[in-house]
Amino acid sequence: MNSQSNGRLTPILTLTLAAVLPAFTPANAQLPRVEALEAQPLQSQIQRLQEALQYLGAPLPQAARDTLERAQASTDNARAARLVQDALDPLCAAAVTIGRDGSMAAHAGARAVELQEQGWRTHLVKVLNQAEAPASLRVSSPNAGPLPEASTDQVALRWLDLQLYNSRPLKPRLGGLPLEYRIIQLYSSEPGPRQARLDFSVDGIGRESNVIKQWDFDNGMDNWFVQRHMDVKAIDGAVVGRSTGNDPSIAALVRAPGGRMKARFSAKAGAGSMGQFFWWTRENPRADGQRRVNFLMSRNGGQWKEYEVGFHVEGELMGIRIDLGSKPTDVELDWVQVSRAEATAGAAASVSVPVNAVESRKVTLRVRDENAKPCTAAFVVEDANGRIYPAQAKRLAPDFFFHSQIYRADGEQLRLPDGDYTIRCSRGPESIPETRRLTVDGSDTEFAYRVKRWIDPSKRGWFSGDHHIHAAGCRHYTNPTEGVLAEDMARHIQGEDLKIGANLTWGPGFDYQKQFFTGKLDKASRYPYLLRYDVEVSGFGSHRSGHLCLLRLSEQIYPGGDSKDHWPTLGLNTLKWAKQQGAITGPAHSAIGLAPTARRVPGVDGPDNLPNYFIPRHDGIGANEYIVDITHNVPGPEGTLVPAVDFISTMDTDRTDEFNMWYHTLNCGFRVRASGETDFPCISGDRVGKGRVYAKVDGRLDYDQWCEEIRNGRSYISDGFSHLMDFRATGETSSVAVGEKGSELRLKRPGKIKLAAVAAARFDDDRRNAAVELIVNGFPRGKRNIPSSGEETKLSFNVEIDRSSWVALRVFPSSHTNPIFVIVGDEPIQSRHSARWFLESVDQLWSQKQAAYDADEQEDARQAYAHAKRVYQRLVREAKYD
C-alpha cells in the first residue's frame, strides 16, 4: 500500500486481478469517453482507487498498472485521459453518465462480466460526471437483495449480490471530477450465463438533496456520543475504538420531520454478530424495540462494509443510535448518512449487463464424532479476505442468514471457488474447537473433521437441552416461508450436540407453525437428538405480565378458539389450564423487567449485589407475574393440587437479576427449580443451546422424563463450558442426591453436612482456574478452584448448617446446580427479609401490570394478587430468621 494512504488500512492477502478481472485488452469502444481533462486530480483519484483495490486484495493487472504509470508520467492532459481510460475501461462492469442537468444514462461493456459461483469478484464502474457535482452514487438490482424476506417468486431472481465500495481510501461521495472510477463488488449464487440489471442513481444533483445529515468525522466525533459499552474516539476522519461489553451503542442527535428514511454507514468490526439501528422521536423519546431495525454486522475480514437500513419515523425524528454488534470487539465507523427514502433525489438509469459465473468446486465433508461415527457439526468458512461462505444474505434454511456458521452432516457438500480458506470447526461447547486450512485448487476436493471432546456429561446420565427455542419470529424470516421447518431446527440441535430441543410456537407464525405440534416427538428427531413442539405464551394472551414456557403439553391451544387471539391475559389462568394436562411450566427470559429501583427493604446485600434487596421495576416480560403465581397451587391432571410454577428460566438474561429472583424464591420456601434456555433466535441468535439445562435421566433418554427431571430439580444449568454433576449432600445418618427424594436432606438438629460433586470447566479465554462456590441461602460459604483446562475434578465441602437452609454450587455466571433442601428439626426454610422483598414487589407489580389484564379478568387478577400478599404477610410474621 502506498505510504501516503491512511495508516489504519491493513493490506489483505493480495491476489492479482488477472484472476478476478478480465484480461487487459485495448479500450472498450462501447463505453463513452472523455477526451480531455485536467490530469492531476484524475491521477490522484486513480491513485486512491489503486490503493483501495490493493486493500481489497484485488490489485490491477500488471498491464493496466503499466499503462497507468505512463498516464501518470504524461504532462499532456488529453493523452493522460486516454491512457487512463485505455487501462481501466476494459475492467468496468458498466459506465454511468451524469448530465449537466442531472439526467443519467448507463452503459454496459462489450463483453460479459465474469463472476464466480458462490464467490465475489471485484470490478469497476466508470463515472462520467458532466455535472462535476460531489454526488452520492448508488447501485441496486432486482437480482440482488437478501433471500430472507423475499417472496417465493423472488427467490430464483435474487441470485446476485452487490455493493459499491465507498470507504477508505475512497470517499462516500464522488469527487466532482468529469471522470472517475468506482469499485463494485459482485457475487453470484448460481453458475452460468445470465443478465444482471443494474440500477444506478445519484443524490444531490438536479434538485434538493434527500440527504438529511451526513457525518464524515473529519472534525472529530461530530456530535456523536457513546451511550454504553464502547471506548471510542475520532482518529483521522473515523470513529475508532472497541466495544467493551454486550450491546455496545453510539448515538447522535438529528432533527427532521418524519417519514420513510434510510440510514447508510460504513463500518468494520473484528467479530461478526447481529447489529441494531434505533431511532427516537419527540413524541417517543426512548430508543426501544418499537423503533429498531436489526442488521447483520459482518466481520468481513476486517474490511470496510457499507450497511443500509430502512426505517419509518412516526412524528419528528430527534436522534439515531447504532449498536455495532453484540459482543466485545474492535470497531470502526467511517461515515454515516441519513436520507429520505420516498424518492430518488436526482435521475436514475438502468442497464442490463451480461454476466457469466464460472462453476465453483464441490467440497465433500467427512464429519465424524469422537467415536468415528457420522455426525453433524458446525463450520465457519472464511476466504483469505475474510468473507463468509456461503454468503449470508443468500442463505435460506437450513442455513440461517444471521449465523456465520453452517451445519453439515457427514457426506454433505459445499461449493467453493478456488482459493485458500480458514474453516473453524466445532460441535457445541463440549467439543474442542479447531481451526483448519483448506485450499481449493482446480478440482473437487474433500474436507475431513473428527470431533474432539473435552467432556461428555451424557456418559454420567446428564442430558443437555434448551427448553426455549423458536422456528419462527425474531431473526427468522416470514418470507419466503413462515419461519423454518422442524428438519432445519433438528440439524442445528445435532450440530450443537444438544440432546433436547423444545421448539416453542409463539405469536409470530403461530397459525402456520401450530401444524407441527403433535404432543409427542417430532419426526425430525434422530435419537439421542430429540425435538418436540410446545408453546411459549408470547405475543398474545398473558405475555405482557410475563412470558410463559409451557412444556410437555398434550393440547397446544387454550379452549375457546383455534389460534392465539382468545387466551387469558392473566398468566395464572393460563398456568391452571396447562397444569391440568400435566405440563411443566415456568417464566421465560426471567430478568426482563427486573432491573432494580431505588427502593429497597431491609437486608444485607451479598457480594456483587447477589442477593440484593432492591425492589425490581417489574415493567417487562420476564419473571414478573411470577412472584404472584409461585404462591398458588392449582389442580393437576388428577385434581391433586400442584405448584403453578415448576421452574424459573435462566442463562439468557442478566444473571444477577435471574439468580436474585430465584434466591429470594428459595429463601421463602418455594421449591422452584432453575432451568436453562436460549430463547433462540430472539434473546440470542448465536446458536441453539447457548443456555442449557442438563437433566439426569436413567436409562434411555425420553423427552417427557427429561421435563419431569427439570420439575424434580434433578438438573443443573450451564452455558456448556462448566459442569457441576452428581451433586450430593450427606448428613450424619442419611444422604441424598439433587433431584432425588425431593432433594431433601433431614437433620434432627443443627450440624455439619458434607457436599460433593464432580466439576469441570473449559473456557476460551485466559482463565487458568474456575471458582466453584458453595451457596447457602443465597450467600457464598466456601470456594474451591478447579483447573479450566477441562479435566473432571471431585469436590467436597463441609459446612455447618444451623437452621433449615438450601444449599447449591455455582461457577458464576457459567453454571449452577439446583438446590438441596436441608431441613433441620422439621422447620421450614423462611426469610423475613426475602418475604418483605416479595410483599413490596407485589404492589410494584400491580402498578405496572394491572392495565395488562382484560376487564373480564380484572377480578381474577385482584384475587390472585391479594392471595400472594396474604402469603407473603404470613411469611413475614412467621419467619424466625431475617
Image (cartoon, rainbow, N blue to C red):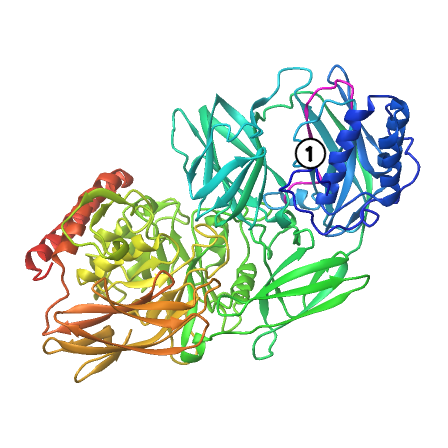
Q: Is residue 224 above or below residue 192?
A: above
Locate the N terminus by quadrant: top right
Q: Residue at x 24, y 73 (%)?
A: 743
Q: Is residue 826 left or right of residue 849?
A: left
Q: Which residue is mark 1?
A: 170
Q: Which residue corresponds to the image point at 85% horizontal and 40% vertical from the top-left?
A: 65
Q: What is the span of residues highlighted in magenta in the rendered image?
A: 128-146
Asked if residue 21 is among those painted magenta in the image, a careful observer would answer no
Which quadrant of the structure image shows residue 32?
Answer: top right
Number of labelled discs? Answer: 1
Asked whether residue 576 appears in the rendered view, the answer is no
Q: Residue furthest front?
A: 3
* Horizontal and vertical percent position of residue 302: 62, 48
849 or 423: nearer the viewer: 423
Give the residue type at disc 1: Leu
- Crowd tier of the residue under label 1, counting other residues whose Cα lies within 10 Å: few below 14, some 14–19, many 20 or above: some
* Visible residue check, residue 350: yes
Locate residue 645, reporting x and y percent: 27, 59
Point out residue 556 in the picture as x, y percentages from the top left corner: 39, 57
Dominant SS in magenta: loop
The C terminus lies in which quarter of the figure? Answer: bottom left
Describe the element under mark 1 as helix, strand or loop.
Answer: loop
Residue 806 point in image, percent of width and height: 21, 68
Whether 274 is drawn above or below 81: the answer is below
Q: Is residue 610 left or right of residue 430?
A: left
Left or right position of 637 against 278? left
